[in-house]
Amino acid sequence: MQSVLKYGLVLLLWRAVAIQAATTVTNIAAGEYHSLLIKSDGSLWVMGDNSDGQLGDGTFNNTNRPEQIVSSSVIAVAGGFAHSLFGKSDGSLWGMGYNYAGQLGDGTFNNTNQPEQIVSSGVVAAAGGDTSFSLFVKSDGSLWAMGYNGYGQLGDDTFNNTNRPEQIVLGGVVAIAARYSHSLFLKSDGSLWAVGDNYDGELGDGTLNNTNQPEQIVPNGVVAIAAGTRDSLFVKSDGSLWAMGFNNAGQLGDGTLNNTNRPEQIVPGGVVAIAAGSRHSLFLKSDGSLWAMGYNGYGQLGDGTLNNTNRPEQIIPSGVAAIAAGFYYSLFLKSDGSLWGMGDDSYGQLGDRFAPTSPGSLVPEQILPRPQPLLNETISSGTNLRITANCQFGGKFYLLASTNLIQPLSQWTPLLTNSIRERGSNNFSVMLGNAVNAGVGQRFYILQSQ
């Protein structure tokens, strides 16, 4: 697989992934408990928490399946705590959702459950922070910010909120990252800058002092950045991975649980993409392998356990093209354009169409395109059905029923006992007592995700 991250180039562009032409999904983003994705036709799709209108579908209803919001021309997405941003091919910036601190930048403090244009042109990148703030970059390299500023994360030399975009840096900015209450940005000379909350050393300046003015952390050589919940990651041009800040669950991946207020090298080379969630981190190597470390209480590391790890652990050996980290869940794209997820699904943010669960999937689960049935059996009685199948490659199994085989998978009715967990190449079986009330001859299917 070719390197996903073209050093020094992809950072300026909305599109972070170049996937084969006939793909389904081309870009992904994770907010706190909601997910956004772009398909190859430029359409925007969303799933998960919608309590503040962050899905932009005109309602406040959560959804556990991908739902189309915009039909075309979308080229980038970003998710915050409960707000969403997206950019169109004409350079316009749009937002929806929670707006109590002015993070949508529309001059009000009113939430909106429908997409609203914020900037008409010239925007090339955006990021949403968890403490209700937003950043964006224009094509001239200028950095702009709006929303909550209680920790100085807007970088305007104040601690005042603003509900209008405010210019912070005149030019030279090529990448931005925001998560909890600090901001990172990268300049065209490879220098890394940070601003905002520094309670756990996430700014990496050797102190624990907050700052409301951008501060240079690394003078050159940086090509990618990610901001987590009070931790930060960056990649240098030699492919080395570095981290600083909060480390109570091992999210820095240095083999300890100790915080650090200075950048620390974690991986010596080969890293091409990074993502940071709430106390868990993901990175992608040039061979397409996916690695994870940190908090795993919801299965967000995808290793089949609920155990934290303070060392990088390989989850997928090859074929991964892009990654995103939500609060307690993770998403990734494969080079064939398929979308996968693992971890917390309590709001439907994995988009797997099944009843929201917490923890959700402990191993990667294919979301799009929908997996096909692997086995079917016609039963001869309505009680005590036993189905046996082989676990081909590990994963999460769903037992589904349908009396009409013409129905699409999304309309099949899940049984109450619809989740069977298996890992490895082992046989499994399940006994369903009084499984069917509809009579003899109903056909059952097992779906398996890798």
Image (cartoon, rainbow, N blue to C red):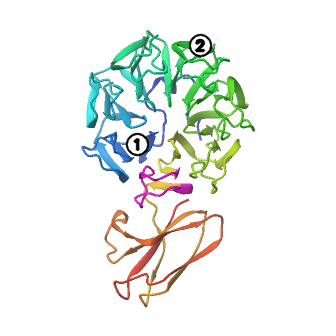
The residue under the point 39% across, 82% down is: 436
The residue under the point 29% across, 46% down is: 60
Which label number is shown at residue 37?
1
**Label 2 with label 1: CB-CB less than 8 Å:** no
Which label number is shown at residue 216?
2
Q: Look at label 1 and name its amino acid.
A: Leu
Rounded to the nearest angstrom, the CA distance separating label 2 from label 1 is: 32 Å
Picture coordinates of residue 179, whole percent (x, y): 50, 31
Q: Look at label 2 and name its amino acid.
A: Gln
Q: Quadrant of the N terminus?
A: top right
| Count of marks overlaid on the render | 2
Picture coordinates of residue 320, whole percent (x, y): 57, 45
Q: Is residue 72 above or below residue 237?
A: below
What stretch of residues is rendered in magenta? 342-364
Q: Name the main secondary structure of what is drawn in magenta.
A: loop
Q: Nearer the viewer, residue 84 or 248?
A: 248
The residue under the point 38% across, 82% down is: 442
**Residue 415 lies in quadrant:** bottom left
Picture coordinates of residue 18, whole percent (x, y): 48, 37
Picture coordinates of residue 22, whole percent (x, y): 42, 47
